[in-house]
Image (cartoon, grey):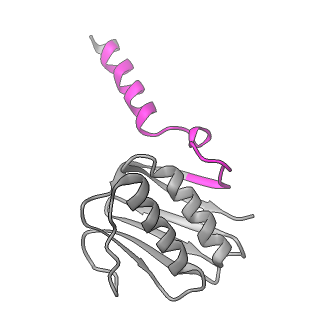
Amino acid sequence: MKTWLIALSVCWLGMAVPAAAQLPLDPQPRKVVWKQGVFNLKKKTYIFADDSQGAKPAARTLRDYCRKSLGKKLTDPHSLPDKGNRIAFYGDDLLPEGGYALRMYKDMIEVRAGSSEGFDAAVHTLMQLMRTRMVPLVNVDDEP
């Protein structure tokens, strides 16, 4: 019985936190850190973009994808709410041209990029992760 429970635990842990090589993304990002849990696209998920170059068009692309492909309408507020599910796009001058960083939490996805190209790459990655409405919690860093 004890051996069976250990085997079951190992299998469960292996499924909950897959290796970075198993991440179903093309192209594979430079760095991926898996975390425990998922971000659920809920009935009321907010999407917000600051005034950085490329942030608003990228947020619009993701919003349209969620509506057309997943049947989820994301709310576009004038400012980011403190609570509730939210996806936020921010410019980050410390990231290289074309680079991006995704930080995922149970109630928030933070998208940071240094350029329009970086935001486009980040959205491409998010759309691949959002094939279902449950997005695995991962931190992703990538650059050309």
Displayed quadrant of residue 6: top left
**Residue 124, image x, y percentages:** 58, 59
Would residue 131 be found to the left or right of residue 119 on screen?
left
Q: Residue at x 67, y 69 (%)?
A: 99
Q: Residue at x 70, y 65 (%)?
A: 143
Q: In the orientation shown, which residue stands out farthest toward the front?
A: 68
Quadrant, the C terminus:
bottom right
The number of discs equals: 0
Q: In the orientation shown, which residue stands out farthest toward the right?
A: 144
- In the depicted view, which residue is nearer to us: 37 or 39? 39
Q: Is residue 119 above or below residue 18?
A: below
Asked if residue 101 is among those painted magenta in the image, a careful observer would answer: no
Displayed quadrant of residue 116: bottom right
Magenta segment range?
Answer: 4-32
Would residue 104 be found to the left or right of residue 81 on screen?
right
Q: Residue at x 58, y 52 (%)?
A: 32
Quadrant, the N terminus:
top left
Q: Is residue 133 above or below residue 8?
A: below
**Residue 74, image x, y percentages:** 34, 68
Q: Is residue 13 above or below residue 104?
A: above
Displayed quadrant of residue 2: top left
Q: Residue at x 37, y 29 (%)?
A: 12
Q: Is residue 46 above or below residue 139?
A: below
**Residue 60, image x, y percentages:** 47, 73
**Residue 54, image x, y percentages:** 59, 80
Asked if residue 31 is among those painted magenta in the image, a careful observer would answer: yes
